[in-house]
């Protein structure tokens, strides 16, 4: 995201504070479970407790529920983009609103 903001600002001759970002639908925090490698790749330490963007779920293997929209908002704000909207839809739990090719292949409605 940071590189996208920088490239956009270079191309449009603007500052990040002038950029407006709209976050589309994605898998939501109730449904997106990740392992420690993803937590780490997204800039957090995989600790055995809840932290912004990640809810810890004790299992035989450590797992977290990731909030992709929150994580994207954090990164965009850090890049200087403050005008943010969208990101409130879950493509898995709102299946009647969103088509999923992979979900259909697995037999989900």
Image (cartoon, rainbow, N blue to C red):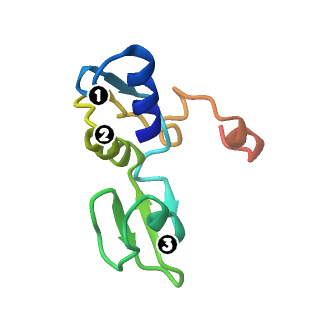
Q: Give the mark, 2 or 3, whose residue is nearer the N terminus.
A: 3
Q: Residue at x 29, y 69 (%)?
A: 50
Single out the mark in the foreground, 2 or 3. 2
Secondary structure type for disc 3 = helix
x, y (%) of residue 2? Answer: 41, 40
What's the distance in space between the residues labelled 2 and 1, CA to CA?
Answer: 7 Å
Q: Give the mark, 2 or 1, whose residue is nearer the N terminus.
A: 1
Secondary structure type for disc 1 = helix
Q: Residue at x 31, y 18 (%)?
A: 14
Q: Give the mark, 1 or 3, whose residue is nearer the N terminus.
A: 1
Which residue does the numbered mark 1 point to in the structure image?
A: 16
Up the image or down, 19 lies above or below 64; here it is above
How many callouts does the rendering have? 3
x, y (%) of residue 77? Answer: 26, 39
> Hey, which residue is sitting farthest bottom in the picture?
60
Up the image or down, 20 lies above or below 95; here it is above
Up the image or down, 38 lies above or below 13; here it is below
Q: Residue at x 41, y 53 (%)?
A: 30
Which residue does the numbered mark 3 point to in the structure image?
A: 36
Q: Residue at x 51, y 26 (%)?
A: 97
Which residue does the numbered mark 2 point to in the structure image?
A: 79
What's the distance in space between the residues labelled 1 and 3, CA to CA?
Answer: 31 Å
Asked if one can make out residue 16 in the rendered structure from this viewpoint, the answer is yes
Residue 12 lies in quadrant: top left
Kindly indicate whether the residue at mark 1 contacts the one at mark 2 (C-beta within 8 angstroms).
yes
Secondary structure type for disc 2 = loop
In front: 20, or 85? 20
């Amino acid at each position: 995201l940071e590189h996208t903001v920088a490239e956009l600002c270079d191309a449009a001759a603007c500052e990040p504070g002038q950029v407006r970002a709209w976050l589309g639908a994605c898998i939501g925090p109730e449904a997106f479970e990740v392992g420690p490698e993803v937590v780490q790749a997204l800039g957090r330490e995989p600790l055995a407790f809840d932290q912004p963007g990640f809810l810890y779920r004790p299992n035989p293997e450590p797992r977290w529920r990731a909030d992709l929209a929150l994580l994207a908002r954090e990164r965009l704000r850090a890049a200087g983009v403050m005008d943010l909207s969208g990101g409130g839809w879950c493509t898995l739990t709102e299946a009647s609103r969103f088509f999923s090719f992979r979900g259909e292949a697995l037999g989900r409605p």
